[in-house]
Image (cartoon, rainbow, N blue to C red):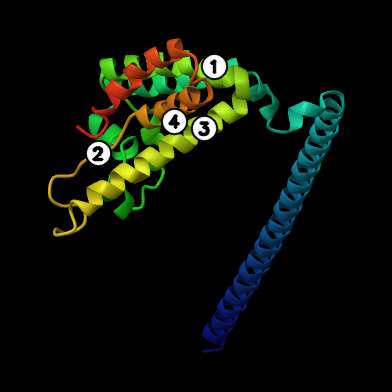
Amino acid sequence: EAGSLGSGGRTMTTQGALARAAAALASSAMARVSRLALQTREVGRSASAMAASSASRKVASFTRGYSGYLSNNPRRGRLDFGRLENYENALYGLMGVNTVVFASWQVVSPTFMLKHFACSTEAIRNFRPHTLLTSMFSQFDFGHFAVNMLGLYFWGRDIGQLLGGRRLLALYLAGGLAGTVVQVGLDYANQREYKWGQPRERYCLGASGAVNAIVTLNILLFRECPSLHLPSIAPLISSSSDSAF
């Protein structure tokens, strides 16, 4: 019995020693893991600080450089509407925008163009007020586009030379907006007995309202010059096709 007890005691002692060794190893491993995690966090903080410092230096350098550029070029830091004083910039700009929109009708989805470049009661009801502006630059038919651009070119030159590019642009926008609002209002009045936007929707598009505003002012200013009245036939003819689509 004494031998078996001694053997059992040695076994328990060995197991206790193994347990203590395993616990020591686990504690050492946990300590190493903790140290590694701390080192990783420190490295991360250091890298973030370095990146933030580098970004700050780059932003500061760009700001100093841009400030110096603006001090040498003061007009570059803001929108330069002074160029519109030259009537040719305004005139050719208007013709260019009309040309781009006309070309878009030929290559872009008609559904998209009709949704965003034609105004109607449906467009206003569905919160697309930008069509009040975009529709005055929108022509999908070449004849309509060509006649409007001829009228804009011949009559716009006279108004531009007399009043300047900014007033030419303002007159174009005011005339186009007024024409669009009146046309949409008439369409709505004709559909009062139906639900708004019903029956078949009528779309308003084209530069004829804007061009006719320029034509009208030109006639009023130069009423004693009969030669200026001849080109007015072109935009007036084109106006009949504005709401036909």
| N-terminal-most mark, 1 or 2 | 1
Report x, y in % for residue 121.
27, 49
| N-terminal-most mark, 2 or 3 | 3
Query: Do callouts 2 and 4 mark residues in contact (Cβ within 8 Å)?
Result: no
Q: CA distance from mark 2 to mark 4?
A: 20 Å
Q: Which secondary structure, mark 1?
A: helix
| N-terminal-most mark, 1 or 4 | 1
How many other residues sit within 10 Å of disc 4, few (<14), some (14-19) or many (≥20)?
some
Report the amino acid beneath label 2.
Tyr
Q: Which secondary structure, mark 4?
A: helix
Residue under label 2, please give it.
203
Q: CA distance from mark 2 to mark 3?
A: 23 Å
Left or right: 218 with respect to 206?
Answer: right
Tell which tag, 2 or 3, sits nearer the viewer: 3
Q: Which secondary structure, mark 3?
A: helix
Mark number, residue 213? 4
